[in-house]
Image (cartoon, grey):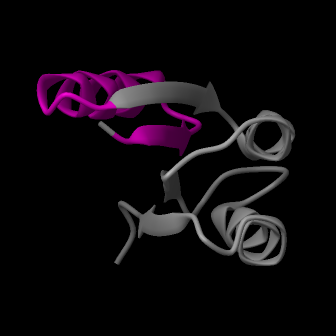
Amino acid sequence: MARVLLVDDEPSILNVLNTLMKAEGHDPVSIRGGEKAIETMLSDRFDLMISDIRMSPVDGMQLLKTAHRERPAMAVIMLTAYG
């Protein structure tokens, strides 16, 4: 079972990802927005972060940079609905 940090600014996307992760036996933590995600990432340990790229004011690329610097062992998957 992996601890998974889910980050998106759309509640419906977070709900779908949360349901999928639980169905696969993982322990998801859903966070709406990048600012809160950074706080959560730095205060807890996760095996994987799945994040939207386009968010404001803290976007997914900023989260990726923070994860790479502060949690280099954590895997990251970036998502976007844009082409």
Quadrant (top left, top right, bottom left, bottom right) of the N terminus: top left
- Which residue corresponds to the image point at 40% horizontal and 63% vertical from the top-left? 79
49 part of magenta stretch? no
Q: Is residue 7 left or right of residue 67?
A: left
Quadrant of the rendered structure where residue 15 is? top left
Q: How many marks?
A: 0
What x and y, as percent, mark residue 24?
14, 33
Q: Is residue 24 above or below residue 66?
A: above
Q: Is residue 6 left or right of residue 42?
A: left
What x and y, as percent, mark residue 33?
70, 37
- Which residue corresponds to the image point at 83% horizontal and 67% vertical from the top-left? 70
The residue furthest left is 23
Question: As rendered, which of 60 and 65 lies closer to the eye?
Answer: 65
Quadrant (top left, top right, bottom left, bottom right) of the C terminus: bottom left
What x and y, as percent, mark residue 23?
13, 24
7 part of magenta stretch? yes
- Which residue corresponds to the image point at 18% horizontal and 31% vertical from the top-left? 20
- Which residue corresponds to the image point at 35% horizontal and 60% vertical from the top-left? 81
Tell me the magenta residue range: 2-26
Q: Is residue 38 above or below residue 66?
A: above
What x and y, as percent, mark residue 8?
54, 41
Q: Is residue 31 left or right of residue 68?
A: left
